[in-house]
Image (cartoon, rainbow, N blue to C red):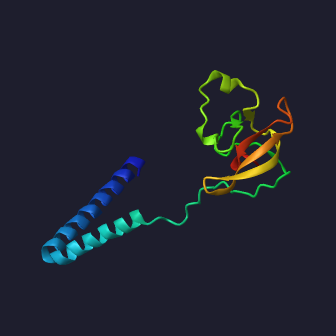
Amino acid sequence: MSNEENTTKIEDTAKNKIGELVSKALALKESNPKLFFGVIGGLVLLIIIVMFSGGGSKPALPKMAMKSIVIGQKYVLKSANAYDENSTVRLVAVPGTIAAYDDTEEEERNSPCKHMPQGTPVTALETQDAYGKKDSQVRVQILEGQCKDQSGWVLAIDLQ
């Protein structure tokens, strides 16, 4: 038997089985409509339950863990919200202005020591509470590069 003949035979068998199931379902509908519609309703209910069940096997999304900042401890700047390795971490002069800065001015974007590259080593000097979070902002001193020994404020989540 060739593959085409075998495939045709399997298709015919499947069509016959489907035809038998449909004819039996229609016969059940005529002879016992309560049972027929009960089975249909049960299948629909089962499908709805499967669709809305959450499935417990999904992994949880990773969260950035807030760690305690230790004054005098050495850290590196690493933006928690950036995937680009070339992105910078913003340092500001006054805590609390981090969320409100506007870097559309040319002078602001090009001023040294305002946008530090990720991986810059720093030392934590002091912390401040903000937005209902303890120690959410940290004043840091830069340890290397052209901005060595200068300080500024960063978000605590930007310290690794």
Left or right relative to 113: residue 50:
left
Residue plotted at (86% across, 51% down): 72
Pick out the residue farthest to the front: 94
Identified at 85% across, 31% down, the residue is: 145
Residue 38 vertical placement versus 74 (above, below): below
Q: Position of residue 7 (x, y in %)?
A: 38, 51
> Is 3 displayed left or right of 67 in the figure?
left
Q: Residue at x 63, y 55 (%)?
A: 62
Q: Quadrant of residue 27?
A: bottom left
Q: For residue 95, which quarter of the picture?
A: top right
Location of residue 59 with respect to 83 vertically, above or below: below
How many numbered markers are drawn? 0
Q: Where in the figure is residue 105, as x and y percent of width and height?
A: 61, 24
* Above or below: residue 42 compared with residue 54: below
- What x and y, as percent, mark residue 104? 59, 26
User: Seen in the image, is 62 located left or right of residue 37?
Assistant: right
Residue 8 or residue 72, whichever sits in front: 72
Residue lying at the far left in this picture: please name it.
30
Q: Name the quadrant containing residue 47.
A: bottom left
Q: Residue at x 20, y 66 (%)?
A: 23
Q: Nearer the viewer, residue 50 or 131?
A: 131
Q: Position of residue 152 (x, y in %)?
A: 75, 39
